[in-house]
Amino acid sequence: MTIAALTILGPLAAATVILLLRRGASAFALLGTGVALFGALVTLVRVSDGGRYSATLPGLPDLPLRLVVNPLTAVLATFVAVVSFFVMVYAVGYMKEEGGKPRFFAGMSLFAAAMQALVVAGDWVLLLAAWEIIGFLSFLLIGFYYERPGVGGAAMRAFLYTRSADLGLYGAIFVLISQTGTSGIRATLDVGGTAAIIVGLFLLLAAAGKSAQAPLQGWLQSAMVGPTPVSALLHSATLVAAGAILLIRTSPLLPPPVLLVVGLLGGVTAIVSGLIAVGEGDLKRLLAASTSSQYGFMLLAVGAGSPVAATVHLIAHAAMKSSLFLGAGVFQHARGSTAFGDLEGAGRGRRWTFAGFVLAGLALAGVPPLSGFWSKDAVLAAVFGSAHAWLLAPLLLAGTLLTAVYVGRALALLWRGEGRDERVAGAGWMGAGLATLVVLAATLGLALEPLAALLGEEVPKDLLVAGLGIVLALVGLPLGWSVPAGRLLGPLRGAAGRGFRFGGGFDGLVARPAMEIARALDAFDRGIHALVLGVGRGSLALADATRISDERGIDGLISALVRGTRDLGGRARVLQSGLVHKELLLAVAGGAVLLALLALGAVTL
């Protein structure tokens, strides 16, 4: 388990050293993610030989923290480590002439460490902690260029969207622990009945926020204001992947009604985000919409009852999308922009970068024998073989066609126009990271079968459906290359350009509800404050009345009693003078008076 823990400890230690020393940031970040990659690969080899590991750490009372290494978590940890390391290699060159390197590389290292913790978490407490850390770090990294106009707003937009959906994870964990009495993830997957439906819907809400599924997809494109390495890591192996990983890991818990909802949501997102990508005028924003669409494919696979198909597409997508983003970053450095109007002919000027971009793009479109063909074929076969194929398959086919269309459009816009050979600072480091990930995007399909076998599952296959996927790719690519976006989208162009703002978009779905909740909580807080003040004032008045009553009532009575006793004592003291002859004289006089009265008959005995 110690080797497996390196996946977390390596980048965590690197971030700590960077923040303390404030120098050598890129070297320590590379070292930390390199250690994580070593730990992940060794762990994967050991797990493939039958090894299973777990560790329990001190945590909350009766809620210990657990780390679990099994085939699924080992595979996921390896893909996170691979992408994180090569994105970090690329980032060394990308950040060569940028300021704030310690802040950037420390944040990226912590990002990788938190994602590894989420992947190998064996209990809900640790998973929730990692989930929250990932969300907070994404806010910091998206807002890295905070001094630029609009960057802070975009970071806050992403934070609010994902934080709103995170309430679903809190609700799911509360129900699971209440039902089972334990925080262990594996032990809680046996919940059934109504509780399973409630938990499943809560988990879907949380996953939809992180993985940018409709109608919560609006934050992902605005998050492109951050550095390109952040975008690459965020979209392929960390934040956005967290939602899909959550559903993959908890898929045994999800009952059929929830699985159907998961599949339908993924299918709708695949189409909606695909249409948004087709109409985009910015390369990074197109890739962001594509990410949302591709995670919709993964939800379709989970909804069809095949988490293994979702897993292989998750891994292949990580290689493809990180390659595309890193290629976009090279073009951005060359032209100073990612708007298609500024990138015309950029592919001609950077031909090696464009060649890698083409390979990754064709893989994403599902062209054989590249990795995306095999992973998308698995999703297609799973959906067509499911009980709800008549509902889910049309959505998936439309999403597959749209993928090829927006890939073809991006390639055309990068190639057309005049090519110039622009100088790019840090090109060596950037090229090394990009080239490795492009090779993985092209060849990873060869490893998907062995990975599925390690998971104890078979990758779904269907030759007829695979052929249909190839046809859609071959139709969509030339359509995107040759037909303008306006003609492709027709009457949907305006809605796609606005991001299909369901329920009023960010303002309607997040900002206004958040403000209403904030106002309601403020009113409630003011009411509580007034109540507390009222109780305090009442208590003070009662105490004051008690004081007055005590001073003027009880104290006065006691004082009067004392005075009366003292007066009576004074009078008695007059009679008791202490002179015996005087007291004897008084006694004799009194006796004489009494005898006289008796003699006169005034007094009778």
Image (spheres, rainbow, N blue to C red):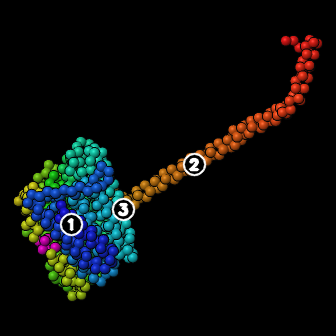
Identify which amino acid the numbered label 2 is placed on: Gly
Q: Of the residues tagged 1 and 3, which is closer to the observer?
A: 1
Give the labeled residue for mark 3: 160
Q: Of the residues tagged 3 and 2, which is closer to the observer?
A: 2
Identify which amino acid the numbered label 3 is placed on: Leu
Image quadrant where residue 403 sits: bottom left
Image coordinates for residue 573, horizontal then vertical, percent: 82, 34
Give the labeled residue for mark 2: 536
Image coordinates for residue 228, horizontal then vertical, percent: 27, 75
Crowding at dot 1, Cα within 10 Å, few <14 / some 14-19 / many 20+, comes out as many
Image quadrant where residue 15 sits: bottom left
Can residue 541 be seen from the camera position used here?
yes
Identify which amino acid the numbered label 1 is placed on: Leu
Magenta part of the chain: 437-442
Residue at 31% x, 79% y is: 23
Quadrant of the drawing holding the N terminus = bottom left
Instruction: Decide which of tag 1 and tag 2 comes sooner along the chain.
Output: 1
Q: CA distance from mark 3 to mark 2?
A: 37 Å
Give the labeled residue for mark 1: 6
Residue at 14% x, 67% y is: 41
427 horizontally vs 377: left or right? right
